Image (tube, helix red, strand yellow):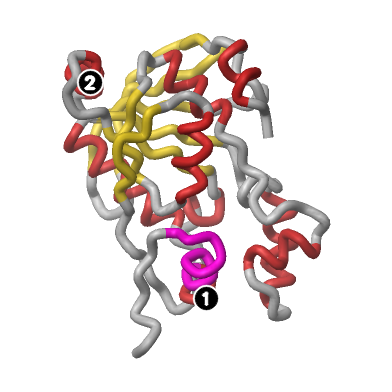
Amino acid sequence: MFEAEAATAIKATVRRQVTVPLRFPDGYATTARVMTFDGLADGKEHLALGLGDWQRALTKSAAGGRAPLVRPHSECLTGDVFGSQRCDCGPQLREAVERIAQEGGFLLYLRQEGRGIGLYAKLDAYALQDDGLDTYQANVALGRGEDERDYTAAAQMLAALGVDRVRLLSNNPDKAAQLTTLGIDVTQRIPTGVHLSAANVRYLSVKATHTAHTIELPLAE
């Protein structure tokens, strides 16, 4: 993980902004202001999507009002693009876009496939999960960390956008902890919905019990 001091020393800037109309498979549509960056500490091509009246949300926050709604969303090709049922990433992305568009804020689309281990390694981990390991055990069996994600770039992106306070749309307490350490004031952590399928119930259960994700599952039934 990058040190917080390094993050504050490295200033990212907005590289370009373009308007992109979005439409999801269920028909929901909105418009995003998609932003790219220079100077991100990890050198990856992360994106920020300004959704809804994000400019007004920034103005209100700067005047002491409610912080903008922000979700750092880790890229998941299998879930976001192909609709994999092994995780809840695709439904979380769809939910987050609509909720943020309603209130004004940002979705940070972070290139952190497989909790930071990459696409091929994630699929290797799937094979180990098929043999009985859980999602965290599988990463470790591959010689990787349980969760290798670092949110330094996310904090840099927020700073470049003029965001120093956020209401964080996330079930993951580590996101809030890292962003706080990196100088972002997390005024509230708001959980996403629970997107349960027959294929992801164990995955969600382990996230709730092992890393204290805010997920309530009907496990007693």
Say few, some or many: other residues with alpha carbon within 10 Å of mark 1 (under 14 / 14 to 19 / 20 or more): some
Seen at 24% across and 15% down, the residue is: 62
- Which x, y percent locates residue 205? 48, 72
Q: Is 165 left or right of 40, judged from the image as shown?
A: left
Magenta stretch: includes residue 210: yes
Amino acid type, mark 2: Ser
- Which x, y percent locates residue 159? 44, 17
User: Which residues are drawn in magenta?
Assistant: 204-213
Q: Sequence order check: which comes first, mark 1 or mark 2?
A: 2
Tell me the residue that label 1 is attached to.
202
Seen at 35% across and 40% down, the residue is: 168
Amino acid type, mark 1: Arg
Seen at 37% across and 53% down, the residue is: 92
Above or below: residue 130 compared with residue 37: below
Q: Is 63 left or right of 170, judged from the image as shown?
A: left
Q: Is 181 left or right of 25, judged from the image as shown?
A: right
Q: Quadrant of the C terminus?
A: bottom left
Seen at 47% across and 35% down, the residue is: 109
Q: Main secondary structure of the magenta part?
A: helix
**Label disc, if present, on residue 61 of the rendered structure:** 2
Secondary structure beneath label 1? helix
- Place residue 53 in its image quadrant: top left
**Label disc, if present, on residue 50 of the rendered structure:** none
Magenta stretch: includes residue 152: no
Q: Nearer the viewer, mark 1 or mark 2?
A: 2
